[in-house]
Image (cartoon, rainbow, N blue to C red):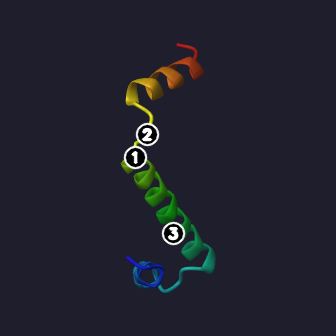
Amino acid sequence: MSAKDILLEVAEKLPSDATLNDAIYELEFRQAVQQGLDELDGGEGIPIEEVKAKIASWAGK
């Protein structure tokens, strides 16, 4: 999907009273999700067991 297609899709889905900040937030969110998916596809993810261990250590467990 091209950048223009994404912009048009976001614009179509926003309510008519949406602000530019709303649009920017939605675009940044979509970009962050896509970046995360691309990283996972590239084998750059962190195993869930490692994530759970880190969270447990942060929580003092």
The residue at which mark 2 appears reads as 45
Q: Is residue 20 above or below residue 57?
A: below
Picture coordinates of residue 26, whole percent (x, y): 51, 69
- Residue placed at 60% from the left, 80% from the top? 19
Picture coordinates of residue 12, whole percent (x, y): 41, 84
Q: Nearer the viewer, residue 15 or 42?
A: 42
Q: Nearer the viewer, residue 26 or 38?
A: 38
Q: Earlier in the sequence, mark 1 or mark 3?
A: 3
Residue kind at label 1, given as amino acid type: Leu
Q: Earlier in the sequence, mark 2 or mark 1?
A: 1
The residue at which mark 3 appears reads as 26
Q: Residue furthest right?
A: 21
Which quadrant of the figure has residue 10?
bottom left
Which quadrant of the figure has residue 48?
top left
Q: Is residue 22 left or right of residue 3?
A: right
The quadrant of the image that shows the N terminus is: bottom left
- Residue placed at 40% from the left, 42% from the top? 43
Q: Is residue 40 above or below residue 25?
A: above
**Foreground mark, 3 or 2?**
2
- Residue placed at 46% from the left, 51% from the top? 36
Q: How far is disc 3 from disc 2 in space, using C-alphas?
A: 23 Å
Secondary structure found at label 2? loop
Q: Is residue 60 above or below residue 24?
A: above
Q: Residue furthest top?
A: 61
**Which numbered disc covers residue 40?**
1
